[in-house]
Amino acid sequence: MRNITNLPAWERLLKRIVWKQIGDLKDKYILDFGSGEGANADHFAKENKVVAIEPWEEMLKYAWKDNEYRQIVGDVKALSEFPDNTFDVIICHNVLEYIDDKEEIVKELARVLKPEGFISIVKHNRNGRVMQMAVLLDDFEKANDLLDGKNSAASKFGEIRYYEDEDITKWAPGLSINKVLGIRTFFDLQQNQDKHPDEEWQKKMAELEMRVSEDPAFREIAFFHHIILKKS
């Protein structure tokens, strides 16, 4: 049995915060697009019907499967089997910055979303990455590159191709941004990384992060943005 404490410290904090921001869901039909190892799918499958789509089959060797959900190995083409207005909630976390066909995917996600539903997108925030490079990692060269508009990289998934929050509604004009929240505002500035895995420290940090997640000043320097979109 796997749970949140099995995750790396940074991801554990992210999941704690984003699940609180999404809130309790029950009896919903949920799509987790780019599901990875299935932590989100498994979490929400406790009380909901969930479909998870992941193109990288290697990720599924370590999939979370404590709760039953349907796993599809595929990409955006897999959405063609679902009619318009299928899902109550769509999750797409840390996916779009690693792919080229962002517009096609966002349009398809909007198509299969019910009019009264919402899409939860988590994405890297360039300003937060600059703060991390300058303060935590002491890498002025990469901080300056980011300020110059260059991309960065993640060790596991490759190049991070940044995009703006508002680009999503340009790609799918039928969507509107309902809310933008910050995630990992302070975590990446804590230089004593030995504290990061400690459960008590994690809970206190998550509480503090939640307090400022909707404050525009703090949100601008958060490492991730969590965007809630609805159909216009």
Image (tube, grey):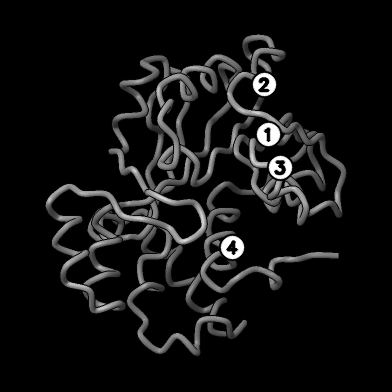
Query: CB under 8 Å between callouts 2 and 1?
Result: yes
x then y, percent, for residue 169? 35, 24
Amino acid marked by disc 3: Glu
Q: Secondary structure at mark 1?
A: strand
Q: Secondary structure at mark 4?
A: helix
Q: Secondary structure at mark 2?
A: helix
Distance from disc 3 to disc 2, alpha carbons, whole Å, reads 14 Å
Amino acid marked by disc 4: Arg
Disc number for residue 78: 2
Looking at the rendered image, the quarter that the C terminus falls into is top left
Distance from disc 2 to disc 4, alpha carbons, whole Å, reads 29 Å
Image position of 13 with respect to 63: above or below: below
**Which residue does the numbered mark 4 point to in the structure image?**
16
Please tell me how crowded label 2 is: few (under 14), some (14-19), or many (20+) other residues with Cα within 10 Å.
Answer: some
Image position of 41 with respect to 183: above or below: above
x then y, percent, for residue 230? 47, 26
First-in-chain label (4 vs 3): 4
Query: Residue at 39% of width from left, 54% of height from top?
Result: 224
The mark total stands at 4
Foreground mark, 1 or 3, reads 3
Distance from disc 1 to disc 3, alpha carbons, whole Å, reads 10 Å
Disc number for residue 57: 3
Amino acid marked by disc 2: Ala
